[in-house]
Image (cartoon, rainbow, N blue to C red):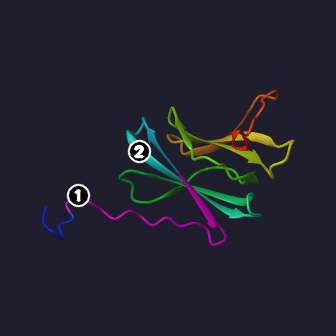
Amino acid sequence: MEQGDKGDSRELPTLSFSPDIGRRTMFGFGYDPSSDKYKVVAIALTMLSLDVSEKTEMKVYGAGDSSWRNLKGFPVLWTLPKVGGVYLSGTLNWVVIKGKETIHSEIVIISVDLEKETCRSLFLPDDFCFVDTNQF
């Protein structure tokens, strides 16, 4: 390919969020077997405090698409995850704490379905015990 020849490359669409969203952004990457596309999920947060989000906006981009699309989700107050999204069977998943982290916090999984491009929360069993290994 000669210098300056773009070949099959194309410019990716700009990722933008609502004016009051986007003080912190996280990304996840996964594969949608129904469309045979790799997709990127962007989650933008407006922070209520240092660790807790007040508003959330989610967008998805599939390889070859012309634009980012809004994910149908839910505004929920949650503490930022300490690890990136985990891909499992066409979904991207984050373990988060609802609200501010306390001894009685409720742990949920935010799950993004890459085929349906929707987001939902999955609740853990009542007897689930979480141990923070970062303290050891």
**Main secondary-structure element of the magenta-colored stretch:** loop
Image position of 7 with respect to 87: above or below: below
Q: Which residues are magenta?
A: 7-27
Q: Position of residue 14 (x, y in %)?
A: 45, 67
Callout 1 amino acid: Asp
Residue 90 disc label? none
In magenta segment, residue 9: yes
Q: Which residue is mark 1?
A: 8
Disc 2 secondary structure class:
strand
Is residue 29 one of those drawn in magenta? no
Q: Residue at x 74, y 63 (%)?
A: 50
Which residue type carries mark 2? Answer: Tyr
Percent from the top left, x then y, of residue 114? 51, 42
Question: Which of the two discs, 1 and 2, labels the residue nearer the N terminus?
Answer: 1
Residue at 45% over, 39% down: 32
Mark 1 secondary-structure assignment = loop
Task: Please say whether residue 32 is visible from this viewpoint.
Answer: yes
**Quadrant position of residue 4:** bottom left
- Are discs 1 and 2 less than 8 Å apart at CB? no
Q: Is residue 55 left or right of residue 32?
A: right
Q: Nearer the viewer, residue 20 or 107?
A: 107
Lateral position of residue 88 relative to residue 106, left or right: left
Residue bearing the label numbered 2: 38
Q: Residues within 10 Å of mark 1 (few under 14, many from 20)?
A: few
State the residue at coordinates (50%, 40%).
Answer: 115
